[in-house]
Image: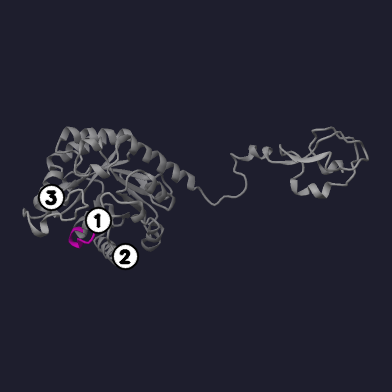
Amino acid sequence: MKEVTIHNRKIGTDYEPFVIAEMSGNHNQSLERALEIVEAAAKAGADALKIQTYTADTMTLEVEKGDFVISDPNSPWANKSLYNLYQEAYTPWEWHQSIFDRCQELGMIAFSSPFDETAVDYLESLHVPCYKIASFECTDIPLIRKVARTKKPMIISTGMCTVAEIEETVQAAKEEGCKEIIILKCTSTYPATPENSHIKTIPHMKELFQCPIGLSDHTLGSGVAVASVALGASVIEKHFTLSRQDGGVDAPFSLEPEEFHLLVQETKRAWQAMGKVQYGPTKAEYQSKKYRRSIYVTENVKKGEPLTRDNIRVIRPGFGLAPKYYEMCLGKTVNQPIEKGTPLSWDFI
């Protein structure tokens, strides 16, 4: 599977990186802000905008103790109950159509991550062009099978997954008829660090699964994403916000519009720079060959005089004999007068 097509956009290493802006909960429960995010993402150059389709009740139980409270002190959501977090972060389903319509008006592909079967049914009613599976749902095989039965392309994040778990997920999708799969390398920490990104996994995943590979990136900045393109990533997904200062559940590890625009530019440049294995001058470099060094006559020389270190030198430009012939030319006599500043050639010897 060399490439995948989503809404007429081809995705693979032969094409510019497909850059996804993830809105997640950065709308802060305001539809007006959500639409502003759509507009800012389009202006920043995003190819697609992704949201998430769930409710607190489809995600978890309304329990505020024990397993249902985030105990990790390093988490941006420490001490929150899962239910309250999802209640704060979810995108109201009645907003989806407005968000998708605005994306279409601005030329962006719009889709979502479903988190249960009811979300898939709802997204099907909106005719989404593809589906994204979040890392935490990658091992939810019933959900994978439900999405795969739509026969639409699937983008699957694989944070925390073993090779066996990824294989099981991909196999389940294929068994249900999904023919176009993109796998994203992901580190499920928020924010993630470059040291924990391990993007050398990208070419290994490409070899193992024979499909386009990308990066779902929770690091700050664009360096990891740019490097991943050089390693073969065809898709880059980044969380997007209007301003981190405005807060929001995912704001600490989201890019602002100017940063996202830079990400789009630099990942495109990284892809362009990949090129092919190339030695010797390119067509663009050919004119620069004249600025190499070569052997020139540096003093007037009479016919029959020998060439010495006093009357020939290796200098710029490059119209004379190559420097490697300098020692060979020393002591040779010339067959005609040569004026200072003449490029040396075998015709004079």
Type of the residue with mark 2: Val
Task: Note whether residue 45 is visible.
Answer: no
- Identify residue for label 1: 135
Q: Secondary structure at mark 3?
A: loop
Q: Which mark is residue 163?
A: 2
Type of the residue with mark 1: Ser
Report, in whole angstroms, how far the alpha carbon at label 1 lies from the one at label 2.
Answer: 13 Å
Q: Residue 56 at what x, y percent from top left?
A: 10, 49
The quadrant in which the C terminus is found is top right
The answer to whether mark 1 and mark 3 are in CB contact below 8 A is no
Q: Is residue 322 left or right of residue 263?
A: right
The answer to whether mark 1 and mark 2 are in CB contact below 8 A is no
Task: Note whether residue 302 is visible.
Answer: yes
Q: Secondary structure at mark 1?
A: helix
N-terminal label among 2 and 3: 3
Q: Residue 217 at what x, y percent from top left?
A: 31, 49
Q: Is residue 31 above or below residue 146?
A: above
* Span shown in magenta: 138-143
Q: Is residue 72 above or below residue 111?
A: below
- Tell me if residue 229 is in the magenta stretch: no
Q: Which mark is residue 80?
A: 3
